[in-house]
Image (cartoon, helix red, strand yellow):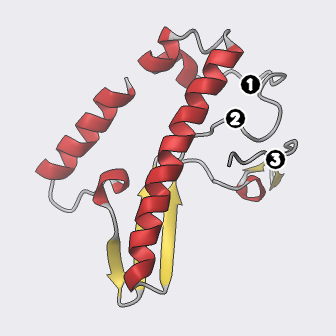
Amino acid sequence: SIAAVRAEAASLTRDVPHLCWLPSAGVITLAPGHALVGQDGWGDGRAGDPDGSTVRLNDWRQIADLLAINAVRDIPARITALRALGDESAQALDRDLALALRDHARVTVLTHVPPFTGACWHDGATARVGPVTIPA
């Protein structure tokens, strides 16, 4: 489950010196004026055609939270769950960026999934996606 993995990651970073899990680390100063922040950054189905896509990620079969809602077959439930996870990451990143920019002119952001469609590459080209809608 997502909660179990997050708890394990948090535990490991408390117990293992020099290991850092970015979602719980907050703002990390790399050098004077330069910070690092990071979040999970879920692929939230807001770009492209999530209703018509034939892609079936293993995440939907392996992550208990997504398996429980039948994310492989129930597209609306999958999109709702992924968007909630994406919103959670975006809100946490927004908080961390605001904190980082108080004391740093430069901030490097790390995420698992690129937050912009232009950064999504496949076979040497930008992934083909449809219009992007960003919620208010």
Q: Earlier in the sequence, mark 2 or mark 1?
A: 2
* Three-letter residue code for mark 3: Ala
Alpha carbon separation for disc pair 2 and 1: 12 Å
The alpha-carbon separation of the residues under discs 1 and 3 comes to 13 Å
State which quadrant residue 22 falls in: bottom left
- Give percent across and percent down for residue 129: 84, 43
Q: Quadrant of residue 82?
A: top right
**Kind of residue indicated by mark 1:** Val
* Whether label 2 touches label 1, CB < 8 Å: no
Q: Position of residue 95 (x, y in %)?
A: 43, 61
SS label for mark 2: loop
Task: Say which of marks 2 and 1 sits in front.
Answer: 2
Instruction: Read off the residue under disc 1.
Output: 55
Task: Report the residue at 41% width, 88% height from top.
Answer: 33
How packed mark 2 is, by other alpha carbons closer than 10 Å (few <14, some 14-19, many 20 or more), is: some
User: Label 2 is placed on what type of residue?
Assistant: Gly
Image point (50%, 12%), residue name: 67
| Residue 57 visible | no
| In this picture, residue 115 sits left or right of residue 129 | left
Q: Are marks 2 and 3 in contact (CB under 8 Å)?
A: no
Q: Earlier in the sequence, mark 1 or mark 3?
A: 1
Q: Residue furthest bottom?
A: 32
Above or below, comparing residue 70 to residue 129 in the picture:
above
* Disc sitting over residue 127 in the figure: 3
**Residue drawn where x is 69% and y is 45% of the image:** 135
Nearer to me, 130 or 134: 134
According to the picture, the residue beneath numbered tag 2 turns out to be 45
Task: Say if residue 2 shows up in the picture.
Answer: yes
